Image (tube, rainbow, N blue to C red):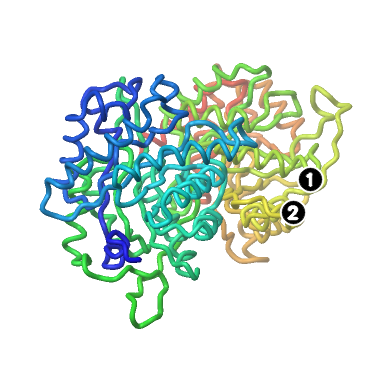
Amino acid sequence: MTNEFLDRLQRGPILCDGAMGTQIYAHGISFEHCFDELNLSQPEAILAIHRGYVEAGAEILETNTFGGNRFRLIEHELESRLVEINQAGVRLARKAADESRRKIFVAGSIGPLGVRLAPLGRVSPAEAYAAFKEQIAALDAAGIDVLIIETFGDLIEIAQAIKAAREVNPDLPIIAQMTFTEDGCTPLGDAPDQVAKTLIDLKVDVIGANCSVGPAKLLPVVQMLSRRANQSDHRPCVSIQPNAGWPQRVGPRLIYPATPDYFGDYVGRFLAAGATVIGGCCGTTPAHIRAMRAALDEAELHRSVRVEVGATNGDQLAAPEIEAAPIAPTKLAEKLANHEFVLAVEVDPPRGHNANRIIEAARELKRAGFDVVNVADTPMARMRMSAWALAHLIQRETELETVLHFPTRGRNLLRVQGDLLAAYALGVRNLLVLMGDPPSVGDYPEAGDQHDIVPSGLVKLIKGSLNTGTDSAGISIGPATAFHVGVAVNFYPPDLDREIKTFHKKIISGADFAVSQPVFDIEPVRLFVQRYRDQFGAIPIPMMGGVLPPGSLRNAEFLHNELPSIRLPDWALERMRTAVDGRKAGIQIAREALEQLREWVQGVYVMPMFGRYDSAAEVIEGMKAEG
């Protein structure tokens, strides 16, 4: 049996409309109102939105029925009007389509139920199936051309919607779209490969991605969906409908940053990635669709066959390969890769559970010019809040990227991997792997000191296992992590040759960058670099040099005499002894070390004493002025 919509898909790319909710909100209707009910109470507003997309050049109009299922309508006491609301939505879209002289398809929009399915929630798959069947039957009876099942984060839930649609009308074309986060996975952690396999097995006509993120983040996802689609016997088409970037709240409004021109520029990349159905989601407007229409027309692809990624068949167009972008690259990684000089500062977690003071300090440090905050883990073996919790809070509250210190001491292999996955789930991507301070020097000298893995081994585990999607036993962890891993380096070791060999081992294990202990005299750095070069060649990873402003003479003497990895030269100790203001003298010593280090390293790592973060800001003031 032929189908007009499926026939149209085979003729080339087709343009869908943009956001419905964003346009409704722009009409002055609050989010508290049931948007689907507007099909009955304010039909002219919905019709005007559809007409706007028709004029912009859309070929598919989605009905205003995204939340028209019984679970969402119950929240507004509208469940008894379910059929009426959904069928009114179809009539409005059809009216706007029929007013045009072009062929425009009406797509019945089906969104998630708004409740969690078992085993995460209390709604059974059978109950979900019944709810979807009820809504889809209403839409089908009103005469839709295609069903668009969109913005799903749960594969179990979307499977029930698809099965219900097949039961209602086996011949109804289905577009099935999942939503993906910035890490390239669904909100429940399914990778694009698994999504594609599930949807292909369910024999939908179009598989795709929509919502959550903007074009740049969704593009690699769609490329992976397309590759899997082309490898299957079923060979569905592929769709993409991104948000207009990541929303920002300005007063009571949500502002989406991506411009219409930006969307128009991405059309060619969507096509090259294998997409056939193209449109927009949250934040997109008729202006975005108009820009995409112009790009499609300019490319003169409206009569070409569907682009096949990696196709070699002479009857098909072969699209160029697109390099899959690294998942959630960190700003630190980008700066180091671009040879920018990085400013980092260390903070210690609080002794209790209230992190407000540290978070406020992080805000000030960001304003002072620091690029990244390093969060120490139980420094000096003193009990403090877990470092990965503070790292998460700082990133969430200040949008300043963090580097999580991750000591191996005191953790067995199970805890190491569990803590790393927890940190990753909270958005922490940069790590500094180190041994850590022994409990004997801290508050709990009787605490265990065991460890199953040394820093170089942990680097290898992270880069060779977790970052490839498995644990240390080779068992899948689902989507791979994308940690950016640093290691410690000591320019003042008791055994220089041994330290150089250890450092080299960390590098060949996969380290991405290195951070040194505090430097006061540049000569040990010169010697270390030269000796490493003599044995192994140039150091292949960027290094960040540590600088520490002593807070007082007493503090300087403690650092010099009681911490084996820190040595203050005689001139520095003498300057602290004769200083009128020890804090200012310490800041000047750190500034001088920074200036000397700039020739040898790609960043500076400031370690303020006694929580004096203002001292850290003063250390880099001179450097900022020069820049």
**Which residue corresponds to the image point at 65% horizontal and 48% vertical from the top-left?**
487
The answer to whether marks 2 and 1 mark residues whose Cβ atoms lie closer than 8 Å is yes
**Which residue corresponds to the image point at 66% horizontal and 58% vertical from the top-left?**
464
Q: Circle 1 is placed at which residue position? A: 413
Which residue sits furthest bottom? Answer: 314
Amino acid type shown at disc 2: Ser
Label 1, residues with CA under 10 Å away: few <14, some 14-19, many ≥20:
few
**Which residue corresponds to the image point at 40% horizontal and 53% vertical from the top-left?**
174
For the N terminus, give its image quadrant.
Answer: bottom left
Which residue sits furthest right? Answer: 446
42 above or below 471?
above
The Cα atoms of the two marked residues, 2 and 1, are separated by: 9 Å
Query: Which quadrant of the structure image shows residue 572?
Result: top right
Can residue 215 be seen by looking at this rendering? Answer: yes
Q: Circle 2 is placed at which residue position? A: 472
Viewer-proximal residue among 499 and 104:
104
